[in-house]
Image (cartoon, helix red, strand yellow):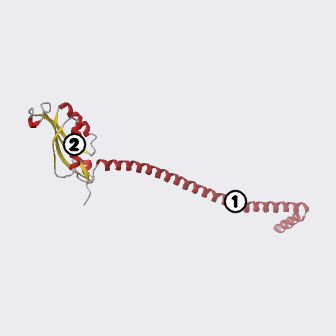
């Protein structure tokens, strides 16, 4: 009986003018809330998706900028490597060339006011420098050269050898006194400079 009485009371309230007003307000509020929810959910999802897309675009742009920076670095390194390769090609000959060495040593002797007495070349072997020998890209030609003249001129040819147009390793330098007039040389050319060295060339496979 209590439940039935409450139902009757609720019906009476709803049928009254005030009850109808409350009912309309409640229904309106529910409808507005429902509409807001229906409108807000797609908007929220759209904003969320847009944020995710923006984050993806930002990451993609950052990756592109990183790759661009790496490419610039590689480009700069390539320029440096090309310059180094050019220098290597200048100072390391393509093949053994004893005639080239003799001609340039004679020029250095003339510039130093010395007379070249002779040059002896040995058989080709591996470079004595470990850094070159480790690569297996170069071969070495050991040679000895002797020059006759005054001691004060010996320093000149040693300096000129530092700018020789081929890569050299000077293994030893020594000088000795010769008899005056020996070998047809004048009295002021009585000292002999002896150089032990090796030059290098590319070890291309035949």
Q: Residue 43 carries which label?
A: 1
Mark 2 Cα within 10 Å, few/some/many (few <14, many 20+)?
A: many
Q: What element carries label 1?
A: helix
Nearer the observer, 45 or 21: 45
**Residue visible at 25% across and 40% down?**
161
Residue matched to label 2? 105
Nearer the observer, 48 or 57: 57
**Vertical position of residue 181 compared to residue 21: above or below:** above
Nearer the observer, 173 or 52: 173
Mark 1 Cα within 10 Å, few/some/many (few <14, many 20+)?
A: few
Decide which of tag 2 and tag 1 comes sooner along the chain.
Answer: 1
**Residue visible at 84% across and 60% down?**
25
**Residue visible at 46% across and 52% down?**
71
Q: Give me the C-alpha separation between circle 2 and circle 1.
A: 86 Å
Q: In this view, does 72 lie to the left or right of 206?
A: right
Q: Position of residue 33 (x, y in %)?
A: 76, 60
User: In which quarter of the view is residue 15 placed?
Assistant: bottom right
Q: Where is residue 169 in the image (x, y as percent from the top left)?
A: 23, 43
Q: Which mark is residue 62?
A: none
Q: Where is residue 5 in the image (x, y as percent from the top left)?
A: 85, 67
Q: Is mark 2 on a helix, strand or loop?
A: helix
């Amino acid at each position: 009986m209590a439940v039935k009485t409450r139902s009757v009371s609720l019906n009476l309230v709803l049928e009254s003018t005030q009850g109808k007003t409350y009912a309309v307000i409640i229904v309106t509020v529910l409808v507005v809330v429902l509409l807001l929810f229906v409108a807000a959910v797609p908007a929220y999802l759209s904003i969320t998706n847009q944020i995710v897309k923006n984050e993806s675009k930002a990451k993609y742009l950052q990756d592109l900028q990183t790759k661009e920076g790496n490419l610039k670095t590689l480009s700069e390194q390539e320029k440096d490597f090309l310059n180094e390769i050019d220098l290597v090609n200048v100072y390391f000959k393509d093949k053994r060339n004893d005639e080239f060495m003799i001609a340039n040593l004679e020029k250095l002797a003339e510039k130093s006011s010395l007379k070249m007495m002779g040059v002896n070349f040995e058989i080709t072997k591996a470079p004595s420098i470990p850094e070159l020998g480790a690569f297996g890209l170069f071969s070495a030609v050991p040679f000895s050269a002797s020059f006759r003249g005054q001691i004060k001129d010996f320093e000149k040819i040693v300096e000129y050898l530092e700018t020789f147009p081929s890569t050299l390793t000077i293994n030893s330098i020594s000088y000795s006194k010769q008899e005056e007039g020996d070998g047809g040389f004048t009295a002021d050319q009585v000292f002999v400079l002896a150089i032990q060295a090796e030059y290098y060339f590319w070890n291309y496979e035949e």
